[in-house]
């Protein structure tokens, strides 16, 4: 089955057995515990909802299928997913090589939590894959990347990084939140683990906080599955229902997000008040060719630098009416933020500026509204500069 068909049907196959109701939509199984007749045999394999739940299982099956993976695991947030991956696959004394531009919450996890367990992290510019090999140490166990990155829209060559990593038996983790499995499939390109903040495009409606992990390797799955249960940061059945509903329209939403983003990126690129636009779909993007090679679309995320000081940035943001000034991304509504003051404020100022997260950097999550309205909104706000 093709992507859109799987998005709608996988995990929700009607049960036609006698006594079943043939639900087209998976029910929300709110029960926290499951009764059994045989003391040694859990009914349907279920015993307690932290350990396993039918609604959660349906979502895990669906997200795994869309990533072309064998195993999906759901979590209560993207950070819960990332934390469980790290604590499942690393031990004290291990070393991670991470892309130098990552979501601020991921860097906070690495710098403020994992360091307490003597797990070392090196931030490396992996736009050049040869930098990976130069950064490998005897205790390196994992490579962690986002592509495109948040918020600078830098790309990694997943295939080449995975090829190098396998030479040294390193686990490659790819945060695929920005692209979603509709536009990019890291497992097909050689990655070992895919993580998602499902709060974003997977949900798509800004109404659920959740995360997911998808893998192919049985041993990796066992380790993460054990800690999914042992640590217990799992989503509720209702959250899983919302995620399932979101996945059914992922393909049509991503196509509209991308269409609008292309139009807006083109508009911003030609505006005299905009210094630079960062969008993989533009030929001006330094890794545009790589984007075309490993992605089937360019997504709905755009970052750009305003020709403005801090007061000008505030004036621009305050003059928007449709774009909402808010954290997060990937919803049907268009959001805008100033990373240095919002999503990446936890990163020290010196480090932010070093990698390019300056005060005049703006990140937008392009929604699925009428693109002419969105461009008009941006144009009006830019006139305030």
Image (spheres, rainbow, N blue to C red):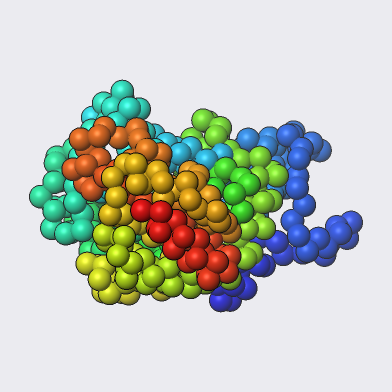
* Image location (x, y in percent) of residue 138: 14, 40
Residue 236 found in image quarter? top right
User: Which is nearer the eye, 314 or 24?
Assistant: 314
The N terminus lies in which quarter of the figure?
A: bottom right
Residue extending farthest top: 116
Q: Where's residue 379, x and y in %? A: 44, 63
| 119 relative to 377, above or below | above
Q: In the rendered view, does 86 fall on the left or right side of 353? A: right
Query: Which residue is more in the foreground, 167 or 200?
Result: 200
Give the residue at x 22% y 67%.
286
Residue 374's x, y, as percent? 51, 64
Residue at the image point whose x is 53% and y is 31% from the top: 230
- With respect to residue 294, does 175 lie above or below? above
Question: Can residue 295 be seen?
Answer: no
> Is the residue 70 above or below the residue 241 in the image?
below
Q: Position of residue 380 (x, y in %)?
A: 46, 60
Determine the residue located farthest toward the left in the rendered image: 134
In the picture as drawn, the residue positioned furthest to the right comes out as 19
Count of numbered circles in the view: 0
Confirm whether residue 307 shows in the render. yes
Pick the front one: 341 or 111: 341
* Side of 86 relative to 129 (left or right): right
Residue shown at 13% from the left, 46% from the top: 135
Q: Is residue 194 left or right of residue 142?
A: right
- Relative to residue 375, is residue 95 drawn left or right? left
């Amino acid at each position: 089955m093709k992507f859109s068909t799987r998005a709608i049907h996988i995990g929700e196959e009607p049960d036609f057995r006698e006594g079943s109701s043939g639900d087209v939509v998976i029910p929300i199984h709110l029960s926290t515990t499951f009764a059994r007749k045989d003391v040694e045999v859990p009914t349907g394999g279920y015993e307690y909802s932290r350990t396993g739940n039918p609604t959660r299982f349906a979502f895990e099956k669906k997200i795994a299928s869309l990533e072309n993976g064998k195993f999906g695991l759901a979590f209560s947030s993207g950070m819960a997913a990332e934390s469980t991956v790290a604590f499942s696959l690393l031990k004290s004394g291990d070393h991670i090589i991470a892309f130098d531009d990552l979501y601020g919450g991921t860097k906070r996890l690495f710098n403020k939590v994992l360091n307490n367990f003597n797990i070392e992290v090196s931030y490396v510019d992996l736009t050049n894959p040869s930098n990976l090999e130069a950064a490998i140490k005897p205790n390196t166990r994992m490579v962690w990347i986002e592509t495109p990155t948040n918020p600078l829209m830098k790309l990694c060559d997943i295939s080449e990084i995975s090829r190098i990593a396998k030479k040294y038996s390193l686990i490659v983790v790819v945060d695929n939140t920005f692209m979603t499995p509709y536009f990019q499939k890291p497992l097909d390109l050689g990655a070992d683990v895919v993580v998602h903040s499902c709060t974003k495009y997977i949900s798509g409606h800004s109404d659920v906080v959740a995360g997911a992990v998808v893998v192919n390797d049985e041993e990796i799955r066992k380790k993460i599955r054990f800690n999914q249960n042992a640590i217990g940061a799992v989503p509720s059945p209702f959250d899983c229902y919302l995620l399932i509903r979101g996945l059914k329209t992922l393909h049509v939403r991503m196509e509209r997000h991308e269409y609008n983003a292309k139009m807006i990126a083109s508009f911003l690129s030609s505006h005299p008040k905009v210094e630079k636009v960062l969008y993989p779909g533009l030929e001006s993007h330094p890794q545009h060719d790589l984007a075309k090679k490993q992605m089937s679309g360019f997504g709905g995320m755009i970052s750009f630098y305003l020709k403005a000081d801090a007061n000008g940035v505030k004036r621009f943001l305050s003059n928007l009416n449709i774009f909402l000034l808010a954290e997060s991304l990937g919803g049907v509504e268009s959001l805008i933020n100033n990373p240095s003051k919002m999503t990446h404020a936890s990163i020290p100022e010196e480090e932010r500026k070093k990698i390019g997260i300056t005060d005049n950097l703006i990140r937008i999550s392009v929604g699925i509204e009428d693109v002419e309205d969105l461009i008009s909104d941006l144009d009006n706000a830019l006139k305030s500069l």
